[in-house]
Image (cartoon, rainbow, N blue to C red):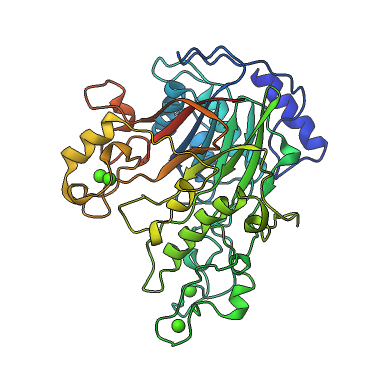
Amino acid sequence: MTTRRRTTVASALVAGLALSAVGLTAGAAVGHPGNGHGHGHDKGTELRVATYNASLNRATEGELVADLSTPDDAQAATIAEVLQRTRPDVVLLNEFDYVPGREAVDLFRDNYLEVGQSGATPIEYRYAYVAPSNTGVPSGFDLNDDGTVGGGDDAFGFGAFEGQYGMVVLSRYPIDTRGVRTFQDFLWKDMPGALLPDDPATPEPADWFTDEELDVVRLSSKSHWDVPVRVGRETVHVLASHPTPPTFDGPEDRNGRRNHDEIRFWSDYVTPGKTSRYIYDDDGHRGGLRPSESFVVLGDQNADPLDGDSVEAAIDQLLDNRRIQDPAPTSGGAVEAAALQGGANTTHRGDPALDTADFADTAPGNLRADYVLPSRDLRVRDTGVFWPEQADPLSRLTGVYPFPSSDHRLVWLDLTLR
Ligand SMILES: [Ca+2]
Ligand SMILES: [Ca+2]
Ligand SMILES: [Ca+2]
Ligand SMILES: [Ca+2]
């Protein structure tokens, strides 16, 4: 299988499908992979979908490729084992540095996912999608108003180098590469009623950015992707993103406001009619998702419904959207961690069972940050967060700070397609 995949990648490159399209479109007739995760997964319309902030970002350009070039990176092996234990059919990985030519994702598949980790069964994703990220791309402006131009905080999205904290979609089902829409370049000012940040030192509202800056400032801190996945005769649109954390800024709250509007983008996108009409993709096509289409919003949204620093309960824009259902996945490990760690967790209003990230317990404490939110037409059969309690031997995969894998936990859903 690995050989066939490599062959297909090579021919796709020859055919000029290069950089933005990684999905392997040749030989699309793939039967159900039978991933054997023990949920009666024997019908062609059952689908396990997951999101996982894998923390596979590195401090310098090239470091991730170097780490994945051998099978010896302990953190990558642990991330791979989480995927092998949970066995999603489709998964979004956040914080996976973007590398042009998709060398990183191929190395991760070859050297980690397709190698059994600590007795787990290898897992094969024949299809993958990666594309450029706004992180680390110089804007040419002093966006953080510190008097100098350059560095991660003046980039279109925060990052020390181009592509840091990127993302990747892995799938056991074919990706409709030609149907993918990306929204990397969409300008923040083009969202009607955008929560543009304000310079508190001036009386004018929403004037943190100059007009020249607003002409280039992009909404998405990484990118927003609509990735259609074909499951039998059905198509599910994976709506992938990773809104910026609503922190690391000043009273202008540019990151908090951006987080809010990055989340809003998908809520508008799945709402038919006037609400989504303003949207344009990187190819210049306008409008949102057709009302008949099934979708799953995936990603680390950096927003808890009740706790943390998000602006105006930003995540409620998705949770309260009439086209979206919230299956509210939980884990026992999150309840145990909140009790053991105390601190900020003791003042949280949200149910600790819903937490998906183990953050510092001074602030903000553990939060619900990672979401798998399907459209209402999809039936949810089961759901969970991979956060084992400490008595479970698999707790070694999630661990305690400093984490062996990630500060986030994998969130999954089992869906039945129509
Ligand atoms: Ca600056
Ligand atoms: Ca002002
Ligand atoms: Ca914590
Ligand atoms: Ca919490």
What quarter of the picture does the C terminus occupy?
top right
Count the marks.
Answer: 0
Q: Quadrant of the N terminus?
A: top right
Q: Is residue 259 left or right of residue 167?
A: left
Determine the residue positioned at 34% across, 28% down: 397
Q: Residue furthest right?
A: 15
Front residue of 128/322: it is 322
| Ligand 4 - quadrant of the structure image | top left
Q: Which residue is nearer to you in this view: 393 or 322? A: 322
Residue 284, image x, y percentages: 75, 57
Return the x and y of residue 89 as percentages of the image width and height.
55, 25
For residue 329, what is the image quadrant?
top left
Q: Residue at x 49, y 77 (%)?
A: 206
Q: Nearer the viewer, residue 233 or 386?
A: 233
Identify the residue shown where x is 57% and y is 46%: 98
Above or below, 123 relative to 332: above
Residue drawn 45% across the image and 41% down it: 371
Residue 385: image location, x then y, percent: 37, 31
- Depth check, front residue: 165 or 107: 165
Q: Position of residue 394 (x, y in %)?
A: 31, 23
